[in-house]
Amino acid sequence: MSIDLVTFDRPPLTAGERKLSHFLLFFENLIKVPLFKCQHCGECILSTTAFICCQNCPKRMRNGPCGGTGEGGTCEVFPERKCVWYKIYSRAKLLHRVSLLYKINKIHDWNLEGTSAWLNVSKKRIDAPIWFVRNDQQAVQDRLADDAAREN
Amino acid sequence: MTLQEKIDAKQFVLCGEIGPPQSCNGDLIREKSRYFKGWVDAVNITDNQTAIVRLSSIAAAKILVDEGIEPIIQMTCRDRNRLAIQSDLLGAAALGLHNVLCLTGDHQKFGDQPEAKGVFDLDSIQLIATVAKMNSGWLLSDQKIEPAPAFLIGAAANPFAEPFEMRLIRLYKKIQAGARFIQTQPVFDLEVFSRWLARVVEMGLHQRCAILAGVMPVKSVKTLLYMKKEVPGVRINTEYIDRMKIAVDAKEEGIRIAVELIHQLHALTGIRGIHLMPVLWESIVPVLVKEAGFQPRS
């Protein structure tokens, strides 16, 4: 199976888009910084991580927790904090959004760092947010069954 | 037979682990390699483990090849960006190193130079997918590589850290990205491990990759207590601590516990091998393999 790791037909931001991005960021930050502690990666995957910004992880993990989560879900780097992915999983379970965690997130495009994710979504540079998940458990089961079928 | 062939043939494999020295003395690696030759199928070479500068994993692995041992190079994302990772992997393939264990890497805070910049350009899952893409003949830039390398891709799993369910999702993603074998953290709590393994089997993941359980022989109760306190994500059953405490000969007891664990793990459904991690106690490997009843390897 091949996985699309990086999108290459992604044109770089034009000068005009950068200006627009700067303008949009003002409003985006008003919401995302206080609510989600947004780290401005420009490649927002908040909707798939149960609306907790995974970029607050010291290792900036985009695909789940590293192996160092301590007892009770503490971060290995800053033991006074909770592991970001521990929080994400707990909330994903609560909101029935666990099936979204099975998706492999792409390698970060550093060209998008510090740009407006809203603009990037509208220009189709990044995936649009997923607002609703129907039948979370079934989605997980289907995914595993599909893999089993492909394997045989 | 290479490790890849053994895994394809579903043989029960044994792996070892060597940490390269904090110097440029290659003889230290040759010396340690003696304890593994003929006793295990392949030997991991750690990549600046716990973020402490050591002799490079790829260079050390080349020394092992010259000694007639099949190495598994470890590749972490802490020290390299995507360019360096791909370049190092091409170099490794050119040197005849075909097994790579993909890790995110310990945070630099735990090392001897905590002020360093951690790269973390990729994470372990994206690294696995990168190696898989290289295997199919493409760099990340979609540049064709000819000939394509043929890496056997490995990954790590930690069954003992929270959130437990998310660990399984991560394992799933690693296999989905292209991991062919999985090495686990050292097992010191069989109950938690069995519970994790049962879920892995339930998800059918044990058929899609070879799971090698980690076993770490310990010399003294001090090591166990240190691990419990200082190493994040490690779980140690108090039974083992008590046994090491009251043992007359701690080393003997350490061997007994390790052999016991090897037997118990061998009996579990879904386990396809053992990964021995004799940190600072390499000389014990032949004893362990003999005591556990495995045949010497050719």
Image: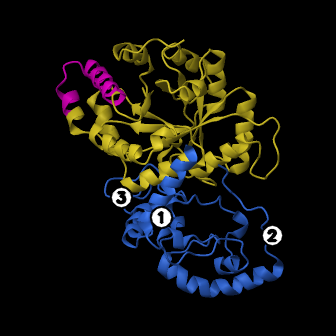
Chain colours: A blue, B yellow
- First in sequence: mark 1 vs mark 3: 3
- Could you give the CA–CA distance between mark 3 and mark 2, rounded to whole angstroms? 40 Å
Q: How crowded is mark 1: few (under 14 residues within 10 Å), some or many (20 or more)?
A: some
Same subunit: marks 3 and 2: yes
Pinpoint the chain carrying mark 1.
A
Q: What stretch is highlighted in magenta?
A: B242-266
User: Which label belongs to residue A11?
Assistant: 2
Mark 2: amino acid: Pro
Residue B71 x, y percent position in the rendering: 59, 25
Residue B241 x, y percent position in the rendering: 23, 34
**Overall secondary structure of the magenta stretch?**
helix
- State whether residue A132 is above or below residue B119: below
- State whether residue A12 is above or below residue B243: below
> What residue is pinned by disc 3?
A73
User: Which label belongs to residue A139?
Assistant: 1
Residue positioned 50% across, 75% down in the render: A37
